[in-house]
Image (spheres, rainbow, N blue to C red):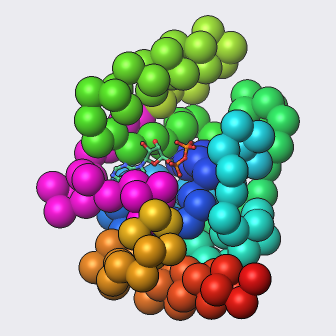
Amino acid sequence: MRVAVYPGSFDPVTNGHIDILEKTSKIFDRIVIAVVHNVTKNALFSLDERVELIRESTKHLNNIEVECFSGLLTDYIREKKACAIIRGLRTMTDFEYEMHMSMMNKRLMPEVDTIFIMSDSNYIFVSSSGVKEAAMLGGDVSTLVPAAVKKGLQEKLKQFKQK
Ligand code: ADP
């Protein structure tokens, strides 16, 4: 069984992430999405909310599992008996960062490779931070995120307005 782990902040999951998942779910038998608590990023959605939004948005894929994760990625990969890490690539900026990460992980786990996937050109410019910014200013993000995420963003906007 070929298992891959797709780690990320997913704050929130976008159509770019979903595109990567649709592509990789055909390559691997099982994909574990590891929602990471990133202390350097100011999260809009809680970990539980992010997990729920991904579950809701990946119902059409039958080999996806979603979990929260904190700690060392290498330990998690071994626990899941995964053979690969999935990461998405958009720009050269992504490449630079991802290259360092993958080399570090390769040094720590020589038996595991990072598989890079480019999303469809429609989603190359889509980022969670861009989506959050647009949505919080009242922009229409319907074509950038799954329906559940659009609803979640609208609820957050409502909460902010009430404060
Ligand atoms: P992280 O904090 O780990 O970068 P993200 O949720 O922002 O978490 O991204 C997780 C992974 O998905 C990263 O490899 C990122 O490059 C990739 N990714 C995010 N958005 C897109 C997109 N629109 N197209 C392709 N890959 C993407």
84 shown above or below 19: above
In-image side of 140 versus 78 (left or right): left
- Residue appearing at x 53%, y 36% in the figure: 84
64 shown above or below 126: below
Using the rendered view, name the quadrant where residue 10 is placed: bottom right
x then y, percent, for residue 129: 48, 55
Farthest right residue in view: 71
Using the rendered view, name the quadrant where residue 46 is placed: bottom right
x then y, percent, for residue 81: 71, 41
Residue 127 or 161: which is nearer the viewer? 161
Assess whether residue 118 is covered by the magenta stretch: yes
- Residue appearing at x 59%, y 61% in the figure: 11
Which residues lie in the magenta part? 115-131
In-image side of 35 versus 63 (left or right): right
Farthest left residue in view: 121
9 shown above or below 57: above
x then y, percent, for residue 122: 17, 62
